Image (cartoon, rainbow, N blue to C red):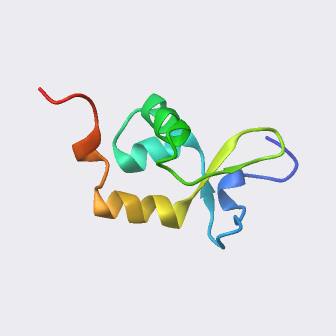
Amino acid sequence: MCAGGSSTSSPTRSGGPDLGGVQVAAILHVSPKTVSRWTKEGRLPFLKTLGGHRRYPETKIRELAAGNTFAATEGPAR
């Protein structure tokens, strides 16, 4: 663990705690790979740390999860 402690307790510029990709995946009920893809597509808000890792604002991610706006757009239509 780094000297700064857990990054999930560090506030982001949005004022709330931030999350890692695995945590976002669990909240949105998708795989971490899907979170990565959605991030690259510009569908998820994020900040990059000095080390180049993506951190996601918890409040925004929970709002997206509550709206369930991603489930209908996942994968090709069958």
Task: Return the residue nearer the eye: 58 or 43.
Answer: 43
Task: Answer above or below: position of 72 versus 33.
Answer: below
* Quadrant position of the N terminus in the picture: top right
Residue positioned 28% across, 56% down in the render: 68
Residue 45, x across and y down, in percent: 56, 54
- 40 relative to 74 in the view: left or right: right
Q: Quadrant of residue 75?
A: top left
- In screen coordinates, is 69 left or right of 32? left
User: Eyeballing the image, is 74 above or below 14?
Assistant: above
Report x, y in % for residue 22: 52, 39
Examine the image and state in which quarter residue 34 appears.
Answer: top left
Instruction: Point out the image quarter for the C terminus.
Output: top left
Which residue: 36% across, 38% down?
A: 30
State the residue at coordinates (43%, 62%).
Answer: 62
Residue 52 locus on image (x, y percent): 77, 38
Q: Which residue is drawn at 65% across and 55% down?
A: 8
Tell me where residue 76 appears, x and y as whole percent: 23, 28
Residue at the extreme right of the image, as rendered: 3
